[in-house]
Amino acid sequence: MSVQDYEMNIKSDCKAEVASPVFESTCKGEIQVTTSDRSYSGGCLGNIERTYAAIDACGNSMSVQRYILLTDNEAPVFTEQFEDIRVKDMTVLRMGHPNAVDNCEGELLWSADDTPIEGGTERGISRVFTVTDLCGNSASSTVNIYFEN
């Protein structure tokens, strides 16, 4: 048996399928390929050691390993945006953050920064919510909070 189209070390998006190497045999019939994975830490999402085990119709077998570095280059996406609001008291300043999702599994980190709204006749703050995934990709959403007199 032999293997074609094979790279030992590759990078892959967290959700992308990695094509199996192509196994060839002089034995006529189907080649069965099974995979097994072991996960390791490293990088922002980790690494996978994937073993491909092939057996042909004549009972010949072969296995190869591939090391997959999981990557993520996509920022989280907001599934909700807050609309500008007017408040009579400060209780809204304790509001939660809008919802967001990421293309990869893992915890999302949140921050909120307030800056005064300057100029004009209205008082308030502009609150910027920033969400960051495990690979450092981030997105921001802003809501203006106006204080009623």
Image (cartoon, rainbow, N blue to C red):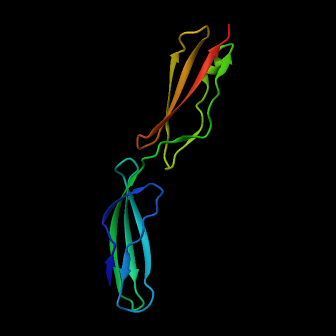
Above or below 137: residue 86: above
Q: How many marks?
A: 0
At x 68%, y 11%, the residue is 148
User: Where residue 109 appears, x then y in whole percent?
Assistant: 48, 36
Q: Nearer the viewer, residue 88 or 60?
A: 88
Residue 7: image quadrant is bottom left
| Picture quarter with the N terminus | bottom left
Above or below 77: residue 15: below
User: Where residue 106 appears, x then y in whole percent?
Assistant: 48, 46
Horizontal relation, residue 3 to residue 120: left or right: left
User: Where residue 22 appears, x then y in whole percent?
Assistant: 38, 76
In this view, the residue farthest toward the front is 120
User: Where residue 94 appears, x then y in whole percent?
Assistant: 60, 22
Q: Nearer the viewer, residue 69 or 125?
A: 125
Above or below 59: residue 43: above
Horizontal relation, residue 62 to residue 139: left or right: left
At x 64%, y 21%, the residue is 92
Above or below 110: residue 10: below
